[in-house]
Amino acid sequence: MQLADPVEAVSNFFDRGGDVLYLILMVTFFMWTLILERQWYYRRMFPVDAQAAIDAWHQRSDQTSWYAMQIRAELISQVRIGLEHSLLMVKSLVAVCPLLGLLGTVTGMIEVFDVMAIAGNGNVRAMAAGVSKATIPTMAGMVAALSGLYFSVSMERFARRETERVADQLTRD
């Protein structure tokens, strides 16, 4: 019976917040899937990719010609592309979350105005459901955005720092 209480609370939260909460949930789930994928890549796959680029550079006999510098630039670019993959999508989803919250605000306020048009200003209880549908999605959108913002910025910083580190290691012997 203890499991029913949290499930019921979540169900009530979604009922009070309206249908926009489901959209915010889907966007947040997708955003966090990308964030977790990037974290997995950074911890498991990136060290292998970086070392492969460094080894490929150090195995070259010619490291000073114009052609060699172009190969070095290509290796650095490949590392950077691997590090920055999906970061723009994560940043976009972080930006979309508050906008979806505002969409929920607008739909909730429309409901409030409908109640006011039908029942007048005296029916506060009927207006409360609309106010709830206006404020809960705004809060949910902001919380979702803030949850992804920190990781978005830290992943971008990590990608920049690691690209520079690999570039520094691709020097002449």
Image (cartoon, grey):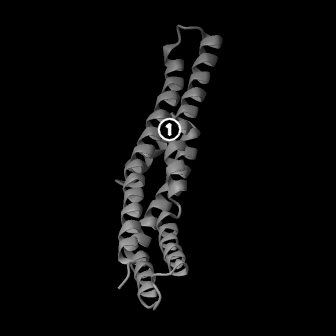
Task: Name the residue nearer the viewer: 12 or 81.
Answer: 81
The quadrant of the image that shows the N terminus is bottom left
What is the secondary structure assignment of the residue under circle 1?
helix
Q: Is residue 45 above or below residue 173?
A: above
Badge 1 amino acid:
Pro
Horizontal side of 24 relative to 167 (left or right) equals right
Q: Callout 1: few (<14), some (14-19), or many (20+) C-alpha neighbours within 10 Å?
A: many
Which image quadrant for residue 114? top right
Residue 152 point in image, percent of width and height? 42, 53
Task: Name the residue nearer the viewer: 140 or 53.
Answer: 53
The quadrant of the image that shows the C terminus is bottom left
Horizontal side of 102 relative to 173 (left or right) equals right
Residue 13 point in image, percent of width and height? 46, 39
Residue 150 point in image, percent of width and height? 37, 50
Horizontal side of 109 relative to 6 (left or right) equals right
- The residue at the point 42 percent across, 50 percent down is 148
Task: Name the residue nearer the viewer: 88 or 123.
Answer: 88
Which image quadrant for residue 44? bottom left
Q: Which residue is mark 1?
A: 98
- The residue at the point 49 percent across, 14 percent down is 124
- The residue at the point 39 percent across, 55 percent down is 151
Residue 14 point in image, percent of width and height? 50, 41
- The residue at the point 41 percent across, 82 percent down is 54
Q: Is residue 4 above or below residue 139?
A: below
